[in-house]
Amino acid sequence: MALQRRQLMALGLTCSVALPARADAGADTVAAQLRAGGVVIAFRHALAPGTFDPPGFRLGQCSTQRNLNDAGRAQAQRIGAWFRQQGLQPAAVRSSPWCRCMDTATLAFGRADSWRALGSPRAGTEETNAASLAELRRAVAAASADRTRFEVWVTHMFVLSDLVGGGASSGEGLVLRGTADGRPEVLARLNLA
């Protein structure tokens, strides 16, 4: 399925898969799940108009990448404000190394640790993408085992799609918990657009 999705992307087409019906809980439910711990809330980066990065982009050089616009920066700040209003403090904030993800994370939470596994699959090979997906699944399972905390991840639509079988809107978060078979389950969605 991941290869087919990437082939469609190359043709300028998209593939979407609906998430489970139980994944559209309200913000109060999301806050309760985060307080209970043992989850990851994985956000798609805030609004960065366009599709894909320009040819020749380089990590670490934001001027060569697609970046957040003013609306995206405001969206990231709203995410952070919601967490502060709820009194929610993530144990870890991890981000794709792409500037639009790092900017989303730092505008919202004031910090972010770059994590290559959250990086865009457009820059990887099938082998590295498969290894990253396996690493993310293990990390969700590990986070699920610790009911004393939650983590925030910021990544790309196609990473979320590969991880859970469906995408997210710009700035939308998916609350994830590992299942017995090792796959992440979407418990709820948070969209503060």
Image (tube, rainbow, N blue to C red):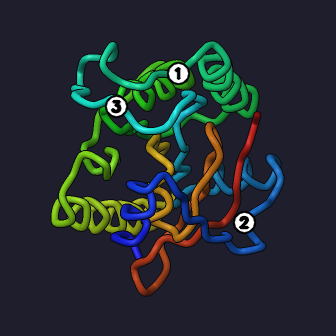
> Where 63 sits versus 24, above or below?
above
Specify which label sits upstream in the sequence, 2 or 3: 2
Q: Secondary structure at mark 2?
A: helix
Measured from the top left, where is residue 130 in percent x and y?
24, 67
Q: Amino acid at mark 3?
A: Trp
Dot 3: few (<14), some (14–19), or many (≥20) neighbours within 10 Å? many
Classify the position of the C terminus by image quarter. top right
The numbered dot on residue 68 is 1
Specify which label sits upstream in the sequence, 1 or 3: 1
Q: Nearer the viewer, mark 2 or mark 3?
A: 3
- Residue positioned most to the front: 11
User: Residue under circle 3?
Assistant: 98
Q: Tell me the distance, in whole angstroms, between the alpha carbons under discs 1 and 3.
A: 11 Å
Q: Quadrant of residue 115?
A: top left
Q: Amino acid at mark 1?
A: Leu
Which residue is depicted at the point 38% across and 39% down?
94
Measured from the top left, where is residue 42 in percent x and y?
52, 49
Q: Amino acid at mark 2?
A: Ala
Of 188 and 58, nearer the camera is 58
- Residue positioned most to the bottom: 181
Classify the position of the N terminus by image quarter. bottom left
User: Residue under circle 2?
Assistant: 23
Of 25 and 46, nearer the camera is 46
Measured from the top left, where is residue 147 in percent x and y?
52, 60
